Image (spheres, rainbow, N blue to C red):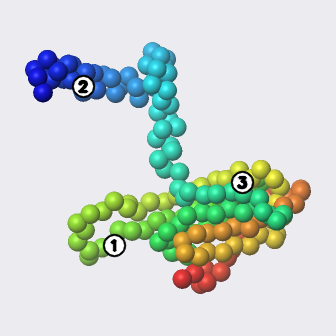
Amino acid sequence: MDMEKLKQWLDMTKQYQATHLWKDIFQDGEKNNSQRDKFNIDPNSFMQQREILPHCDLYEYEGMLIVEAELPGINPQEIYIALQNTQLIIRGEFKSLFPKIQYYLKERPNRKFEKKIELPIPVSKNKVTTSFDNGILKVFLPIEKGDTEFVEISFDKSDSL
């Protein structure tokens, strides 16, 4: 690489090395809105999206709303499910850190989660069923009109693998 190209490359990377650039992008306040708009970054939603667990699907099939939640490695005893008005709440904790183990790589932290899923259609709160198989929690919500009360949902936690 010739010296001129190296100089151009170093000049180009200087803008990313300057700490004020990153402060301008992620700092709150009216004075920085134009810089954030330029990069199309919302720091609040950017940080919140990293913590949205578990990953879920919500779909309608044969008169039911079905929610599938990825919960690999979680103990079914640690899962809490409830209906509150038009929201399904799934709460629990991923526990992957074990004492007395010497880790050489640890990328999966212990973390608590709570996912609130807005249901698009009223469901029959007293007919909800669940299953848990291969790390996938399924919640079956029969479609019905008029239910808006809070109901805790239990499921057979000994049925998992």
State left or right for residue 151 relative to residue 17.
right
Q: Which residue is mark 3?
A: 87
Helix, strand or loop at mark 3? strand
The reply to whether callout 2 and callout 3 are in contact (CB within 8 Å) is no
Give the residue at the far front of this rendering. Answer: 1
1 or 3: tag closer to the N-terminus: 3
Of marks 2 and 3, the one in the foreground = 2
Q: Give, as a three-letter code, the residue at label 2.
A: Thr
The mark that comes first in sequence, 1 or 2, is 2
Q: Element type at marker 2?
A: helix
Give the residue displayed 50% in from the left and 35% down from the top.
44
The quarter of the displayed image where residue 153 is located: bottom right
Q: Which residue was labeled with disc 1?
A: 98
Label 2 belongs to which residue? 13
In-image side of 32 versus 124 (left or right)? left
Q: Amino acid at mark 3?
A: Gln
Q: Determine whether 97 is above or below 11 in the image.
A: below
Q: Amino acid at mark 1?
A: Phe
